[in-house]
C-alpha cells in the first residue's frame, strides 16, 4: 500500500520517547504530597500512557475527591523540568523520516496535556516531523485516547486510511472507537499480551518494523 496521503498517528509517551523517568519522579512527588505510600514499580509502569486522572484513581487508588490535588502536585513537579527527562527511542527519527519521504501525513495523538506534549517533542527534536499535535486539555475535559484521536482525524479530513501507532491497550481501544487500526509499539511498557488482547492490528517489535506494518494495515 502506498504511503502517499496516508495519515499516521503516533502516541507519545512510551511510543516516540521513553518518558518514564520524569513521569515516575512526578508520581512519587504527588504521592508524597498526599501522604500516600510510595508507589510500587508496577504501579509506576501502569501510570505511563493512560490519562493522569484515571491513573491516580485506578492505579494508585486516590479517592475521587483528592484526584485534583494529586494531578496538581504531579504537574507542578513535572512542568518544573521533569517532563524534559526523556529519551527518543532508537529508530524513531529514521521511521518518521521514512514515512515523511513516502508522503504520509504524521500527527501526534496523546493523553498528555497538549502544551506539555509540544514541549517534549520540541525538546526531543521531533516536533518538525509532525503536521499537528493533539493532546489532553489541562482542565481534563479532553483526556481520553478516543477524544484526541477524534481531534487528529478532524484536523486531517483528507488523510487516507488512518492508522495509530501506540504502546498500550487504551491506544488500541481509543483508535478502534473511530474504526482506526492500531499498530502496537512492542518496544513500549505494555505488559505481555496486552496489545494483542486489546485487538492491535499488528505488533511491531521495533520502530523499524512499523513501516512494513503500516504498509499491510488499512
Image (cartoon, helix red, strand yellow):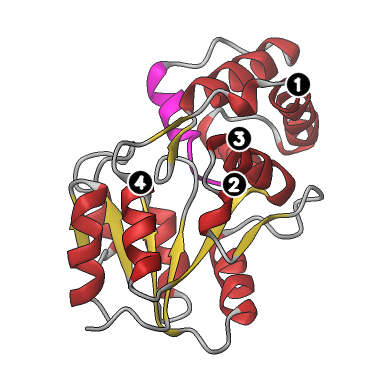
- Which residue lies under the disc numbered 4? 92
Query: Main SS type for the magenta part?
Result: helix
User: Relative to 199, is 88 above or below?
Assistant: above
Q: Secondary structure at mark 1?
A: loop
Quadrant of the image occupied by residue 141: bottom right
| Residue denoted by label 3 | 123
Q: Nearer the viewer, mark 4 or mark 1?
A: 4
Q: Give the alpha-carbon distance from disc 3 to disc 1, as whole Å.
A: 14 Å
Residue 112 belongs to the span the image colors magenta = no
Nearer mark to the viewer, of 4 and 2: 4
Relative side of 87 to 24, left or right: left
- Sequence-first disc among 3 and 1: 1
Q: Which residue is mark 1?
A: 80
Residue 52 percent across, percent down from the top left: 62, 40
Element marked by disc 3? helix
Disc on the earlier residue, 3 or 4? 4
User: Residue 48 colored magenta?
Assistant: yes
**In the figure, is residue 101 to the left or right of 17?**
left
Q: Nearer the viewer, mark 2 or mark 3?
A: 3
Residue 135 x %, y %:
65, 56
Instruction: Count neighbours of disc 3 (C-alpha within 10 A) and say few if under 14, some if 14 to 19, many if 20 or more.
Output: some
Q: Which mark is residue 51?
A: 2
Q: Which residues are magenta?
A: 41-50
> Where's the N terminus, which quadrant?
bottom left
Amino acid at each position: 500500500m502506498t504511503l502517499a496521503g496516508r495519515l499516521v498517528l503516533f502516541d507519545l509517551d512510551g511510543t516516540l520517547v521513553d518518558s518514564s523517568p520524569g513521569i515516575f519522579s512526578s508520581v512519587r512527588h504527588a504521592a508524597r504530597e498526599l501522604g500516600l505510600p510510595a508507589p510500587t514499580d508496577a504501579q509506576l509502569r501502569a501510570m505511563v500512557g493512560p490519562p493522569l486522572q484515571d491513573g491516580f484513581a485506578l492505579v494508585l487508588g486516590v479517592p475521587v475527591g483528592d484526584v485534583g490535588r494529586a494531578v496538581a502536585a504531579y504537574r507542578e513537579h513535572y512542568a518544573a523540568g521533569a517532563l524534559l527527562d526523556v529519551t527518543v527511542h532508537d529508530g524513531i527519527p529514521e521511521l518518521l523520516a521514512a514515512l515523511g519521504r513516502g508522503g504520509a501525513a504524521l500527527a501526534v495523538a496523546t493523553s498528555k496535556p497538549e502544551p506539555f506534549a509540544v514541549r517534549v517533542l520540541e525538546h526531543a527534536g521531533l516536533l518538525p516531523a509532525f503536521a499537528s499535535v493533539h493532546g489532553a486539555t489541562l482542565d481534563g475535559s479532553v483526556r481520553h485516547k478516543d477524544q484526541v484521536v477524534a481531534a487528529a482525524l478532524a484536523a486531517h479530513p483528507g488523510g487516507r486510511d488512518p492508522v495509530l501507532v501506540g504502546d498500550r491497550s487504551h491506544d488500541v481501544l481509543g483508535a478502534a472507537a473511530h474504526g482506526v487500526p492500531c499498530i502496537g509499539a512492542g518496544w513500549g511498557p505494555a505488559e505481555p499480551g496486552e496489545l494483542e488482547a486489546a485487538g492491535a492490528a499488528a505488533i511491531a517489535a521495533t520502530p523499524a518494523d512499523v513501516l512494513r506494518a503500516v504498509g499491510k494495515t488499512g
